[in-house]
């Protein structure tokens, strides 16, 4: 039997590139793709210490939505959702993007007020959204328990029909394949250990495979961004935490949409293959260990069972953890650093997957021009000094 | 699940505790003289090392007292 065609080459690193991106997750790969596609910059390397898309890109719960409260967030997440809607044709690769909608349930009066306010904010920003009563929730997702006789009854929910899920691995492969065809070098097993500097400017990276020079460098290293930045003495407002997720065995189609609940705290969808995919909040403590504590899983399954009594029949097959970099306002940092020619894309915390094409687009622009795209201009590092925070912590409908 | 040693109550399960983040971050001695940058550092910036980290926990479901530990952020081993 013949091996199928490889989707990308395995090149040796060159001595120098116009742009080096650190981290071949979804964001790094999308950035490389749009650097080539939108800006004609193809002398690019994406350096990955492990294997391609083996970090949070392999560990997320694949939810895609844009129903964020604040205008700045609406801008970048809706840009991303619009790109998702045409991405299959653009990348010529099917990654099972399914716009099955997202329900964000409300269980308290405060949840109801927050949800209605967010639906209105979304509509003002041209984002689809509506408020559903408990009966309407039950029509959209019949397996949700909308009985009033539970500890936290469903009082309604927000509904974004254009939201959905995609097959995360395929998304990474689709971007990698196209970036590779443009001539981008995707270099796995290449760990960046430090930077080559000239005064207050970076001119390259030190790696386990030798020095690689670069005109501009973009960090897309998620939970390890602090570690990289600290080698230059840059302090970032990031804390790295474990975020866990889990799947059940393969089941017949039972769950038609994506359900998120801030209050009992779980989010659930059913993958195309049939697994129930669930996630919740981060483990409280700082960690780089890519695993978390079992009581966090227990809590999210308890929440899932309250919402979906039918899940009592399902078995937990696998849990895992990734390391997410969380900012104080739960919004990312995308832009310049105090060091010339070094740019960061970090702080996505628990919600980076949905932004993959959108952030690739704006980070590529930032790296190509040396200054931010209008959509990532508000997401600066300086906002923590000026106070212009984009506070999505309580606003964004669950921990992403 | 971490097993955390409270200095007063001994080893207890993580669910009895709440996390307090980096230890030894004291309130500015002369707050009125701080620049915006210095306030930002105090309010929003914390160390985030991969390795040993001095941090705070509170034994919420026990003696309700705060204490400092040093924990390795890769292995989660408590060193003190």
Image: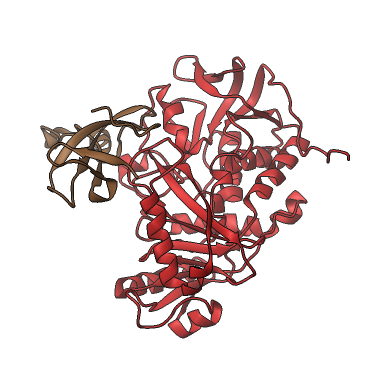
Is residue A108 or residue A246 the one in the foreground? A246
Farthest residue, direction bottom: A135
Rendered shade, chain A? red
Q: Quadrant of residue A100?
A: bottom right
Q: Is residue A385 left or right of residue A48?
A: left
* On screen, residue A396 above or below A100: above
- Nearest to the observer: residue A239 or residue A282: A282
Residue A325 in the image, given as x and y percentages of width and height: 42, 41
Residue B35 at least partly seen: no
Nearest to the observer: residue A218 or residue A174 = A174
The number of discs equals 0
Please give left or right for residue A250 compared with residue A128 in the image.
Answer: right
Relative to B1, say whether A271 is above or below: below
**What quarter of the picture does the C terminus of chain A occupy?**
bottom left
Name the residue furthest right.
A1
Q: Is residue A304 visible?
A: yes
Is A55 left or right of A264, judged from the image as shown?
right
Q: Quadrant of the N terminus of chain A?
A: top right
Which residue is at 54% across, 70% downward? A128
Q: Position of residue A135 (x, y in %)?
A: 47, 85
Which chain did the image draw in brown?
A: B
A225 up-or-down from A313: above or below: above
- Residue A287 on image: x %, y %: 38, 37
Q: Would you place residue A28 above or below residue A60 in this image? A: above
Colour pattern: by chain
Q: Position of residue B32 (x, y in %)?
A: 12, 37
* Quarter where residue A347 is shown: top left
Q: Quadrant of residue B40?
A: top left
* x 33%, y 31%: residue: B77
Q: On the picture, is A30 further left or further right than A321?
A: right
Q: Residue at x 24, y 33 (%)?
A: B38
């Amino acid at each position: 039997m013949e091996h199928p065609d490889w989707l990308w080459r395995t090149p040796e690193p060159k001595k120098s590139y116009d742009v080096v991106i650190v981290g071949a997750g979804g964001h790094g790969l999308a950035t490389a793709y749009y650097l080539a596609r939108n800006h004609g910059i193809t002398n690019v390397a994406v350096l990955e210490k492990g294997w391609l898309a083996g970090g949070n890109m392999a560990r997320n719960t694949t939810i895609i939505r844009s129903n964020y409260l604040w205008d700045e967030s609406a801008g970048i997440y809706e840009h991303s959702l619009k790109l998702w809607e045409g991405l299959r044709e653009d990348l010529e690769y099917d990654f099972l993007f399914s716009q099955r909608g997202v329900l964000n349930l409300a269980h308290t009066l405060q949840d109801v007020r927050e949800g209605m306010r967010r639906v209105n904010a979304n509509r003002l920003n041209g984002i689809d959204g509506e408020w559903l009563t408990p009966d309407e929730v039950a029509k959209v997702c019949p397996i949700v328990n909308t009985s009033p006789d539970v500890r936290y009854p469903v009082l309604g929910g927000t509904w974004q029909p254009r939201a959905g899920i995609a097959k995360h691995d395929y998304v990474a492969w689709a971007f990698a394949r196209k970036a590779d065809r443009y001539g981008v070098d995707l270099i796995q097993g290449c760990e960046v250990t430090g930077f080559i500097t000239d005064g207050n400017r970076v001119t390259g990276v030190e790696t386990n495979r030798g020095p690689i020079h670069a005109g501009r460098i973009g960090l897309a290293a998620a939970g390890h961004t602090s570690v990289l930045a600290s080698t230059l003495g840059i302090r970032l407002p990031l804390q790295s935490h474990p975020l866990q997720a889990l799947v059940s065995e393969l089941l017949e189609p039972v769950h038609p949409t994506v359900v998120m609940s801030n209050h009992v705290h779980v989010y659930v969808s059913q993958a195309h293959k049939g697994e129930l995919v669930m996630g919740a909040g981060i483990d409280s403590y700082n960690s780089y260990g890519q695993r978390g504590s079992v009581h966090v899983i227990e809590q999210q399954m308890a929440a899932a069972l309250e919402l979906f009594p039918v899940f009592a029949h399902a078995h937990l097959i696998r849990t895992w953890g990734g390391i997410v970099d969380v900012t104080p306002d739960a919004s990312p940092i995308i832009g310049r650093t105090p060091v010339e020619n070094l740019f960061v894309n970090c702080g996505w915390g628990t919600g980076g997957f949905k932004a993959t094409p959108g952030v690739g687009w704006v980070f590529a622009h930032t790296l190509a021009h040396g200054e931010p795209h209008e959509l990532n201009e508000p997401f600066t590092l300086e906002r923590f000094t000026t106070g212009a925070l984009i506070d999505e912590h309580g606003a964004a409908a669950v921990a992403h | 699940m971490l097993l955390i040693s409270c200095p007063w109550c001994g080893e207890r399960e993580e669910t009895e505790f709440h996390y307090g983040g980096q230890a030894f971050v004291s309130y500015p001695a002369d707050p009125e003289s701080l620049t915006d940058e210095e306030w930002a550092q105090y309010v929003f910036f914390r160390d985030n090392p991969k390795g040993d980290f001095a941090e705070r926990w509170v034994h919420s479901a026990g003696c309700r007292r705060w204490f400092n530990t040093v924990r390795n952020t890769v292995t989660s081993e408590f060193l003190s």
